[in-house]
Image (tube, rainbow, N blue to C red):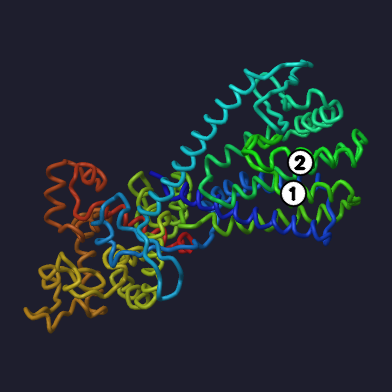
Amino acid sequence: MMNVSILNLYFSLHVVILGAAFLSYLLRTANNKKWIPLKAKEELHLNYLLLILIIVLPLAASFLTDRYQFEPITRTFSATTYKEFDSLPPAESHEKIILGESKIHTDVPLAWLKNFALWLLLTSCFICFVRTINEILKMTSLLRKSFLVKSLGKVRIAFSDRINVPFSLLTLKHAWVVLPESYMMQSEKTRISIYHELQHHRQGDTQWVYLFQLFKAFAGVNPILHFWMKVISELQELKVDENLIGRGKVSPRDYAQCLIDVAESVVMGEKQLVCAAGLPFLPERHLLKRRIDFMFRRNVSNKIVFMFLVAFLLSSMASFAFGTGNFVGSRSMSMDEVKKLALDVGEEGEFPIIVNELVLEQLNRYIGTVQGKEAMKKALRRMETYRFLIEGKLKNYNLPFELLAVPIIESAYQNLPESQNPLFAAGLWQFIRATARNYGLRIDRALELDERLDPELATDAAARYLLANQLRFKDWHLAVLAYNMGENNVQKAINKVGSRNAWDLITAGYEGDKNYLAKLIAAILIMKNPALVD
């Protein structure tokens, strides 16, 4: 199953391909209309640059969005409270993507989106594999039955009675040029065709074919990719034409006539293997016209214009990649980073900040999943409403400022009634009835009076409860465990485990809400460094 970062990378790849194809189309249109006169070689090199950027930029975007803040395009629903969040399955099937920022939006389960992306990837790979094997078998059969006429180093020149159009092909051992058998008695056409196909080998077109196949393996379900690969193949042909005519190897008139003869030979026939593309298609009328037009066009190279276009493509493609590099949103921290963060936080406060694997896991869950991050951001915003009240109470009872984070993991700073909690707790501090009454909060049977929902009274009771636990256990970690699971249960755990270290009790399985202490420390770190969830 894809994780979120790979999912981001996959969708970023498709968006970048769309952007690259669009930019390629703009270049092609501008060159055809002579708004930006470019040689075929320059236009092809700009397309090669786009191909390279397709590989580099999504990877860079995926790498950098884990270290810098980029708002995700999509968001997820967050649970009402962290207790509800933790009660949901760990497989993330509960997470839903919100497509769009408006109040009217479309809900898509994140697991469904991952499965869909995985299905697209596997489909692309399967189709590409089948087609590639089929082409290899056809090529192998064709080359085996061809008549070899000349061998020059790695180059092999052969004739075949199974084709109507010349083509070139690079294998592991040889660079092949294969001509139709009908050319054997036409020396001028043979000469021009050999020059043409050898030029494909010289300029690396027969090598790019394999990279094209790799692209199709990963994104072959994207129809725009196939259109763009065809455009690049056409540009390769134009560059060959430009080189042969420019170097005076052949005359433009003879070369143009050869192109027309080739087109006529297949226009009524079946699809053929054409030149370096290695893929079957019929020569199109517009391409033939464009090739002949390029032969007689005299575009002058302009380095300033070319460099401007390079800069334009780089900036445009970067915007496509980084704009979608955090499609769903993902961020995580290493153990070393969190320890450094904890060291800075620990120097400022009285509550002991311990970082271990449990704390790291919870911290990354809050800042590394969109659901966790959104819930934490909302909790921190709500906290500001009660900050002055709670800080005042903590100061009155000489309690650590860090306990301001307890309502974050209890209620996400929502003053929730008991009816919204399956455990029958209520208020910012999520008191159950028995504990609330022990600390002076009044609750009647009909819940018409429920002082757990009075922020000031509940905060005072919570402060006294935490202070009582600290006085009893002389340890803040044990005190907050007692707040969550009850002081008597903590004492029983100490007696059974034989340790007063809260983490030993947790490791032995004695805790209330799972990972309660780890969540609290993670919340403290985020509370003191809110930029982590910005």
Give the image location of residue 16, x and y in percent: 60, 53
Give the image location of residue 501, x and y in percent: 25, 45
Residue 408, disc: none
Q: In which quarter of the image is residue 469?
A: bottom left
Mark 2 is surrounded, within 10 Å at the Cα level, by few (under 14), some (14 to 19) or many (20 or more) other residues, namely many
Q: At x 74% / y 27%, what residue is drawn?
A: 179
Horizontal relation, residue 371 to residue 62: left or right: left
Residue type pointed to by label 2: Glu
Furthest residue in direction left, as rendered = 445
Q: Which of marks 1 and 2 is nearer the N terminus?
A: 2
Q: At x 35% / y 44%, what residue is drawn?
A: 357
Residue 510 versus residue 183: which sits nearer the camera? 183
The secondary element bearing badge 2 is classed as helix
The answer to whether 413 is drawn above or below residue 207 in the figure is below
Mark 1 is surrounded, within 10 Å at the Cα level, by few (under 14), some (14 to 19) or many (20 or more) other residues, namely some
The answer to whether 419 is drawn above or below residue 474 in the figure is below
Q: At x 11% / y 49%, what residue is drawn?
A: 492
Residue type pointed to by label 1: Leu
The secondary element bearing badge 1 is classed as helix
Q: Which residue has dot 1 on it?
A: 287
Quarter that holds the N terminus: top left
Q: Which residue has dot 2 on it?
A: 237
Q: Quadrant of residue 200?
A: top right
**Of discs 1 and 2, which sits in the foreground?**
1
The answer to whether 502 is drawn above or below residue 201 in the figure is below
Residue 187 versus residue 437: which sits nearer the camera? 187
Give the image location of residue 274, x and y in percent: 69, 36
Horizontal relation, residue 97 to residue 38: left or right: left
Give the image location of residue 506, x and y in percent: 23, 46
Alpha carbon distance from label 1 to label 2 = 10 Å
Cβ–Cβ below 8 Å for labels 1 and 2? Answer: yes
